[in-house]
Image (spheres, rainbow, N blue to C red):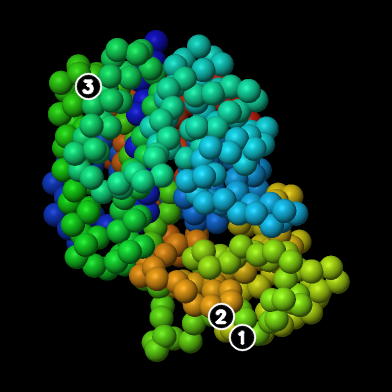
Amino acid sequence: THNKLLVISFDGFRWNYDQDVDTPLLDYLAEIGVKAKYITPPYVTMTSPSHFTTITGRWIEDHGVIHNMMFNPQTLRKFSIKATQNMSEWWDNGVLPLWITAQNQGLKAGSFHYPGGNANYSGQTVYKALAEAFDHPDGDEKEWRDNIDIVMKWFNEDGLDFVTLFYGEPDVTGHLHGPETEQRRTIIKQIDRTIGYLLEAIEKNQLKDKLNVIITSDHGMTTVKKEPDVKEIRLSDHINFKDTVKFDILDYGGFGMILPKEGKEEELYQALKVAHPNLHVYKKQEFPEGFHYSKHERVLPILLYGDLGYSVNGRLILYVNKGDHGFNNSEMDMKMIFRAFGPDFKKNYTAEPFDSIHIYPLMCKLLGVIPEPHNGSI
C-alpha cells in the first residue's frame, strides 16, 4: 500500500521569500525533507493556469486553462477568477486532473480551495471539494489552522488518500503592498507558524509515518514599475480601440491578448509592435514555442507581454497593484518554492531547480497511480 499525500499551495510564494525573514519551520522542513533551490512555473505565470499544470502534468496549451478568467470572445463576456472556479466548461477540456485519475483507480481525493477542484471532469467530481466563498478572507490565521484540522479529518475519518490545499497568501499581500515590503515579510512569518501547526497536527493525528507532504506555489511576484520611474505601457496611446479591437484581455498584470476586428489584425500588430520598448508583441502563430502556451484554440490572435515589472495596460492605467506576475517564466522573480517531507522523501536533500510540470509524475508515483499522458518526467 502507498502512503497518503497532501499538497499545499501557497499562492505567489516567490522562491526567495524565506531568505529575508526568520523562518525556523521552513528551515526545519529542509532538514527533515527535500528542498528545491527553486522551481519554474509554466507560462503564463498566473494562478489557475499554473495550478492546473501542477495537477495535470500538462502544458497550458494542452490543458486549455489559459487564463484565470473564463472568457468568451463571441459574447464578449469575462468572468472573475472566483466565478470561473464554478464553470466546468473552462476546466473540463479532456485532460483529467489527478484527483479524478486517482479516484478512477480506487483512491479517494479531496480539494480544499484548490483551483479547478470544484469543476466536473467528464461528468465526475472530486469526492470532497470545498470552494472559496466570494468574501473569503485570505489572511485569517485561525481559518488557516481550521483548514488544516479539516484536512486531517478527511484523511483520518473520511479515508482520503490525496488532498490538495490552497492558500491565497502571500499573493494577496504581494499584490497589495509589493514583494519587498514589511507586510510581505509578516505574512511569510504567518505561513511559517502555520507550517508549525501543520507538523503538530500530523503528529497529533498519527499520520507522521503514512503522510507525504508537498509544499509549493504557482508563481512568484515582482514590484510593478510605475511613473515617474519608468514610462508605463498604455496601449490606447498607440491604437484606437474602437476601430481595431473586438475583444481584449488586458489590465491583468504582465500579459495580455487581443482579438482584432475583422481585417484589422495587421494594422493593430504593426502599431503595437513599435508601441513601447518594454512591450513584446506577437501574432499567435509566431509566439515562442518554448512557452508551450499559444497553440490552444482559446488563445487570441495577438499576444503581448511586458518586461519584468511592466504591466500591460489597455485604455487607462487603473492598476493599483504594487506587485504583480504574469511575466516571463525565465525571470527569477517568477520562480517559486518547493518543499517536501514524509516517509517517502529523502532527508536534508537540496534538489536542483526543475519545472513545476514534473510535480505530476512525482505525485502519481507517491500515490501508486498510473498517470495520464503528461509532459513531465521524474
The circle on residue 99 is none
Position of residue 351 measured from the top left corner of the image (x, y, whole percent): 35, 44
Looking at marks 3 and 1 on the same chain, the residue that comes earlier in the sequence is marked by: 3
Query: Residue visible at 23% across and 45% down?
Result: 140
Compute the Cα span from label 2 to label 3: 53 Å
In this rendering, is residue 53 above or below 159? below
Label 1 belongs to which residue? 237
Query: Residue visible at 65% across and 65% down?
Result: 248
Position of residue 160 measured from the top left corner of the image (x, y, whole percent): 38, 17
Compute the Cα span from label 2 to label 1: 6 Å
Looking at marks 2 and 3 on the same chain, the residue that comes earlier in the sequence is marked by: 3
Q: Residues within 10 Å of mark 2 (few under 14, many from 20)?
A: some
Position of residue 270 measured from the top left corner of the image (x, y, whole percent): 75, 81
Q: Amino acid at mark 3?
A: Lys
Q: Element under label 3?
A: loop
**Drawn side of residue 317 relative to residue 183, left or right:** right
Tell me if residue 111 can be seen: yes
Label 2 belongs to which residue? 234
272 or 333: which is nearer to us?
Answer: 272
Q: Element under label 1?
A: helix
**Drawn side of residue 39 relative to residue 154, left or right:** right
Q: Residues within 10 Å of mark 1 (few under 14, many from 20)?
A: few
Q: In which quadrant is the N terminus drawn?
A: top left
Compute the Cα span from label 3 to label 1: 59 Å
Quarter of the figure with residue 237:
bottom right
Query: Residue visible at 74% across and 66% down?
Result: 246
In this rendering, is residue 104 above or below 133? above
Q: Amino acid at mark 2?
A: Arg
Q: Amino acid at mark 1?
A: Asp
Label 3 belongs to which residue? 208
**Drawn side of residue 374 relative to residue 37, left or right:** right
